[in-house]
Image (tube, rainbow, N blue to C red):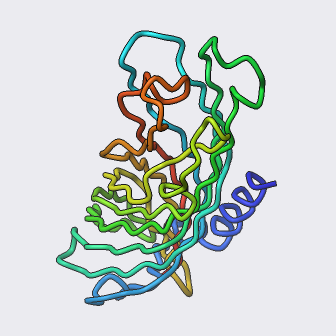
Amino acid sequence: MKHLIIIIIVALAFQNSSAQLFSKEKIKNLENFDKQRMSWGYYLGFNSYDYKFDYNEITEEIITESSTGFNVGLVGDVRLNNYFNIRLEPGIAFSTRNLTFSDPLLTTTAQREREVPSTYIHIPLLIKFSTKRSNNWKPFVVAGVSWSNNLSSDQDNPDDNSSGQFRQKTNVFNYELGVGFDLYLYYFKFSPSIRGVFAMGDELVRDTDPNSAWTGNITSMQSRGIFINFTFQ
């Protein structure tokens, strides 16, 4: 269903703009839009998160199963010159990961498997580099840093995996890299993009037992995410 929604959005955007994007007439939509010092908008999109684990000793890896999550947020854009913009994109992201632990001491499904839901307040600060506009479209790349506050982290929960509770740190700092393109439609600018989000620090809250079958062999655990966003300005 979610993939169908993406196809419908892209198809509608293409239908409304294809004649002006690729026609020889080259009628420019929103010709002065990029001359604004500041502009505003919002985005909707999807995400897929997993974890990168590093271990103290070579062992069977923890299996991470990702699912498709949802993003929504606002965009504030400041024009620096014809090619560079600074963007602040505060939003919220929902995701769920399922972990399967392989330690032989974990003999039941309830011990081996953990569902890890996450609700992030996600605030990226990005530099956007765009090429010269060609008719009614313009490709760009973005890079920057972000702060995420995981409202579902359970960092301060006294229970750990021995009680069925998997815990993460609440505050996460990330770096981000992405690509996309701006489509100048008749009434607004539509910008689909894809972006990688990579945590820079260890997010794992370890169990009380230093030899825990769940966390004892983990050196670090870092989130990695892919965001597909559709921005409207």
Q: Tell whether 134 sits left or right of 48.
A: left
Give percent across and percent down for residue 97.
Answer: 63, 42
Count of labels in the image: 0
Instruction: Determine the residue positioned at 28% across, 61% down.
Output: 131
User: Residue, x 41% and y 40% (percent of image)?
Assistant: 222
* Closer to the camera in the image, 91 or 53: 53
Relative horizontal placement of residue 6, taking residue 195 as reference (left or right): right
Q: Is residue 94 left or right of residue 196?
A: right
Nearer to the camera, 154 or 202: 154
For image coordinates 55% across by 23% down, the residue present is: 213
Q: Residue furthest left?
A: 81
Counting from the top left corner in percent of width and height, residue 42 is at 52, 79
Q: Position of residue 3 (x, y in %)?
A: 74, 51
Q: Quadrant of the N terminus?
A: bottom right
Q: Nearer the viewer, residue 45 or 103?
A: 103
User: Where 98 sits versus 210, above or below?
Assistant: below
Instruction: Classify 76 as above or below 160.
Output: below
Task: Give the percent coordinates (x, y) of residue 90.
Answer: 43, 74
**Which picture quadrant has residue 107?**
top right
Considering every residue shown, the one lying at the far right of the view is 1
Q: Is residue 42 above or below residue 68?
A: below
